[in-house]
Amino acid sequence: MSQENRPARPSGRPPESGFARLTRTESSLRGPFLCFFASAVLWLVVSSVLALVAAVKLHRPDFLGACELTTYGRVVAAARDTFVYGWGFNALFAVNFWIMAQLGRFEFRNGWLATLGGATWNLALTYGVVQVVRGQLGGFALLDLPREVGPVLLLAFLLSALWSVVAYARRPGGQHFVSQWYIVGATFALPLVFLLAQLMVLWFPTVGTVQALAHAWFVQNLLFLWFGASALAAAYYFVPKILGRPLGHYYLAPVGFWTLFLFAGLGAPAALLGGPIPIWLQSVGVVASVLGIVPVVVLAINFFSTLSVDGGWGRSWNSTTLRFVAVGIVSFLLFGILAAVFSTRDLSATLAFTSFAEGQVQLLTYGASTMILFGASYFILPRLTGSLWPSTALVHVHFWSAFLGLLLAVGAALAGGWQAGHQPSAPSTPWALVGSVAAFLLLVGHVAFALNAFGMILSSTTPTSDGRSD
Amino acid sequence: MKNLNLLLAGVFFCVASVWTGLLVTAQVQLGSLGRAPAEEGGPLFPAREPGLAIQGRAVYLDLGCVACHTQQVRPAGQGSDIARGYGVRPSVARDYVLQPQVLLGQRRVGPDLANYGARAKSDAELAAFLAAPAAGVNHPPYAFLTAERSAALVAYLKSLRQDYSSPEAKLKQ
C-alpha cells in the first residue's frame, strides 16, 4: 500500500513497511536492540535457575539448606527481581522501542545513549541481586533491592526508554496507532510510580501500613501499566500486521486504554483485603478491580473479532510469532477475568495468602507479557540479524516447554491455592511438586530459546539499508 | 490521541489522581496515629521492642522470612485467622506505628506471626526448631545461624504481640 492510498482515518492496522527508509530505521536501532535483548535472555536463564531452586525448596526445605546464600526467602526474591527487572524490563525496552521506531519511522541517531542506559541498568541490577542473595533485602516484593539501587535504575530507565516518547513526538504526519499510546503511557507512568514508591517505602518511609498500601499501588501499576500495557502494545501491533487485516472494532481501543490506566492503580487496596487499612480503601480496591473487566472486554472484542474471521486462529497457530502472541492474548484475558472475579471479599477471604495470587500474577507476567515478548522476538530478530533461526527443533522445544510449563505452573498455583484456602490441613506437597516440574520445563524452554537466539545473533550478517524488500 | 502533550497529561492525571486519592488520603488519615493505652492510665501499646528484638528484626529481614509468613490478623468476617488461633483480635493500623519497615507479608507457607509472642514456645525450644525443624515440618533449617543471631531472632519473634486492646479493636473480656 503506497502512502497516497493510505486512508485518512485510523485504520486499526499499523502502517505498511516496505520503504528503504524503514530499513534505515531498523539499522539504526539494531545495536541497542541486540544489547537489550541479549541481556534480557541471559537474565531470563538466571531467573529460571533461581526459580527452579525456589520451587524445589517449597517441598524440600532442606535442599541446599546448609548454605545461607540459598535461603528460600533470598532465592525467591532474587528469582522475582531477576525475572521482572532483568528479563522483563530489558526485553520490553527492546521491543517497545522497536515498535515505536517502526510506527514512527524513527531513525535512532543516539543509540549509544540507550546502550549506556542498558549497561547502567544491568550493572545496578547485578549489584542489587548480589546484595539480595547476601541478605541485604527489604521486606516488600519487587521493592526489596537495596535502596541505593533505586536512583540508578530510575536514571537508567530514562536513558533506555524515553526514546519511545521521542519517537512518538517526531513521527511524521501525525498518524497514531493504539500500540503507540500504550507504550507512551507505560513509559511515562512507570518512572513516576517507581519514584513515588521508592520515596514512600524506602527513602522517607511513611508511618505504618501506608507503606504496605504504597507497595501494593506500585506492584499494581508495575503489573498493569508496564508489563500489561507493553504486552498489549505488541499484541495490537503484531496481530493485524501478520494477519494482514485491520483490527476489529478498533474504535473501542481508546476506551480500553483509558479504563486500563485509570482502574489499574485504583485496584491496589484489593491486595490488602481484611488487612490493617481503612475499610473504605478496601472497598475502593474491590470496586476498581471489578471495573477492571471493562478493558478486558474491549481487548476481547478487538482481538477475538480479528482472529475469529477467515481462519485467523489457524493462521496464528502456523505462524511462530502469532502462536506465542495468541497464547499471550488468551492469558491476558484470563488474568483480567480472574482479577475482576477473585478480588471480591468472599473469594478473597479464603484465597488470600495462598499461591492463588501468585498464579494470577504469573498468568500476566509470564503467560501474557513473556509469551508475547517471545513472539515479538521471533519476528524482530531475523530482520535485525539477517539470519534465520539456527534450529527449528529448538523453536518447537521452546514453545512446548514454555506453554506446558505455563499451564502446569499457573494450574498448580491456582489449584493449590484453592485447596489451601478451602482445606487448610490438606498437604500442599503434590502442588509444590507440580510447580517444580513446571519450573524445570520453563528452564528447558528458556535455554532452548537462548541457544537459538545467541546462535542467530553470533552468526548474523550486518543488514544493508538498500536492496531489502519487506 | 495524536497530541503527545494531551496523552501525557491524561496519563499523568490517571496516575496522580489515584496516588492522591489512595495514598495521600491514607497518609492524612493514618499518618498521625501514635501509641495508645489499652486502658485509661495504663501503659502505651504497641510496646517498644527491646534492643535484642530490634537486632532480631534485621535477622528476620535478612533471611527473607516475610516470603512465607505474614504479620496481619484479619477480622472474623474476612477469613478464619482468629479461629485458627493466629490472633485474639484483628490487626489495626495502630499496631504497626513503631515499625520502621512494616512486614505484613503476602503469602502464608507458614503461620501468621503477628501475635506469635503470645503462643510461642520457650526460647530454647524455638531456637532448636529454627536450627533443625522436626521431620515433616515444611520449614527450612537454619543451622548456619550463630548463637547471637539465633537469640536475636527468637527475641524478635517473641516480641510480636497483638494481644492488647487498641481504641480501634478492643479485646472481648
Image (tube, coloured by chain):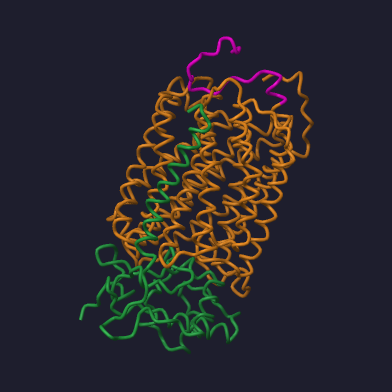
Closest to the observer: A354 or B45?
A: B45
* Quadrant in which the N terminus of chain A appears: top right
Residue shown at 58% from the left, 58% from the top: A79
- Say which chain is green: B
Q: Quadrant of residue B106?
A: bottom left
Q: Is residue B127 left or right of residue A340?
A: right
| Image coords of residue A448 (percent x, y) | 65, 45
Closest to the observer: A40 or A150?
A: A150
Query: On screen, A48 above or below A162?
Result: below
Q: Is residue A281 visible?
A: yes
Classified by dominant secondary structure, the portion drawn in magenta counts as: loop
Closest to the observer: A307 or B6?
A: B6
Query: On screen, B138 above or below A447?
Result: below
Q: Is residue A49 left or right of residue B61?
A: right
Report the residue that reaches farthest toward the left.
B173
Query: On screen, A226 above or below A150?
Result: above
Q: Quadrant of residue A76?
A: bottom right
- Counting the numbered discs, the total is 0
What stretch of residues is rendered in magenta? Answer: A1-24
* Quadrant in which the C terminus of chain A appears: top right
| Image coords of residue A355 (percent x, y) | 42, 58
Residue shown at 64% from the left, 61% from the top: A128
| Image coords of residue B45 (percent x, y) | 35, 80
| Residue A12 belongs to the span the image colors magenta | yes
Q: Is residue B132 visible?
A: no
Colour assignment, chain A: orange
